[in-house]
Amino acid sequence: MTVLRRFMLFVVVASLLAPTTGAQAPAAAGGVPRPNVLIIFTDDQRPDTMMVMPQTQKWFEQLGTEYPNTYAATPLCCPSRANIMTGRYAHNTGVVDNSTHHSMDQSTTLQALLRQAGYKTAVVGKYFNGWPLRRKPQHFDRWAIFRSGYVNTKWGVDGKLRRIGRYSTDYIAAKASRLIKSFDKSKDSQPWMMYVTPSAPHEPFTPVTRHANSAVPPWDPAPSVGEQDKSDKPQAVKNSGADREGVSRLREDQLRTLMAVDEMVGRIMKELREQRELKRTLVFFFSDNGYFWGEHGLTDKRMPYTEAIEVPFYARWPGRIAKGVKDQRQVSLVDVAPTILAATGTPPHPTVPLDGRSLFDTWDREDIYTEYFPDKAAGAIGSWASIRTRAIQYAEYYAADGITVDFREYYDLVEDPYQLDNLLEDDDPTNDPSPAEIQELSLRLSSYRTCQGTSGANPCP
């Protein structure tokens, strides 16, 4: 069976098996009080780490909707945060690496739009890497921000520099809970929006003392861990070589840092319950990007393979988002802001279109688009862009001019889910996609690299 026929068969089967969306029409449109919005997102968390987070699973898997096909729009910290805050791809926000946060028009952010619409806004945890801690993050009424880390971290708290000796995830849990209490004890009924952003499970992977020796589930490495033949991969992957023993220790410590995140989620959700705000609050839990555990010899993220771009993603809003449902649509992190604007009845920016789509709307995205731009910390990794469907993934790597294609990858995700065999470089012409298919994918990718909005002359997928 050809790759194209496999793709068509897969699409038909997937359409028959996929359940209906777990999201209903936004409450704000029906005159019901606008919801509070709580956005909890971790840093470098893979979906297969959720097994060490039983409280989070209870609050979200059992009492909310899971979106198991969710992907980062750029697998790097600051660009991904900008994607989340604006509902736009990096080529539109200008935040293309970890040092360009100043390029984003802050008036287009979710916090700006909600604050203008009457929301109280707050952020607790990691913000942009280079943001000065003394400086107020724009459009936030309350803030406690840091750059990263776990122990003895430096913070900017409502305009004051502080050194926090407490384990950072525990401090975030306490600070966020206090803010919820203060918001809900105020005399007005003003709704609020808050980002809660722990450093975990980002390096240096430091568990809190109480979890330093906690047992973690055994590791069953994927076939791509320790991949022997990488001759069909780009040069940056050929040059990689993660140590399996080191990766195993890294994995264990990442999982242990998430145990404290699980406790944080439990504490915050219980605070919402104590304040009788659970039914009124739309809550998200997700990560900014994934992370490699030795797949293709890699650690870190930054590459287009599944482990770096796939993220856990959950939403709950009692009475509006179904409980215990898996929504199989292909979701991008640029969909977060449009969903929240729809839920709160807040108009988008009048002149800057959203690239993402509200989860409350009816759609089924065929292509997931992911892009990456050179970052000084990444060394040899240059810019790339990728299209991922339910059946295949196609990626292009670009020369220094950002236009000339240096290398291509094409994976049949049905036959080769671990992305071991790049069909364009395996010297087997019998399984090659046709030149016409590659040309069509390349043209689509070229269009997505400059797309803007979801309609018009050059819409995003």
Image (cartoon, rainbow, N blue to C red):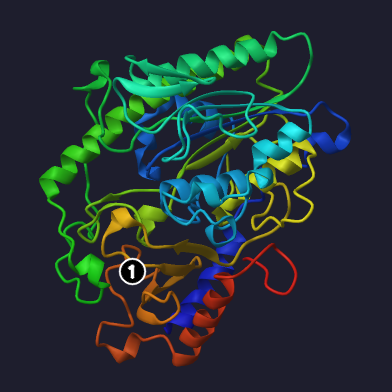
Frontmost residue, 273 versus 195:
195
SS for dot 1 = loop
With 139 as the anchor, is 59 left or right in this view?
A: left
> Residue at coordinates 76% horizontally, 34% vertically from top-left?
116
The quadrant in which residue 133 appears is top left
Q: Is residue 221 left or right of residue 102?
A: left
Q: Is residue 30 left or right of residue 37?
A: right
Of residues 430 and 284, the one nearer the viewer is 284
Expressed as whole percent of the image width and height from the top left, the position of residue 35 reads 73, 28
445 sits to left or right of 171: right
Whole-percent x, y for residue 22 in the image = 66, 43
At 59% from the left and 37% from the top, the residue drawn is: 315
Taking the view exactly as shown, the residue that stands out farthest to the right is 31
Q: Which residue is mark 1?
A: 416
Label 1 environment density (alpha carbons within 10 Å; few <14, some 14–19, many ≥20): few
- The location of residue 295, given as percent across then percent down, is 25, 57
Residue 321 vs 298, above or below: the answer is above
Kindly identify the residue that appears in the image at 54 percent across and 32 percent down.
60
The amino acid type found where label 1 is placed reads Asp
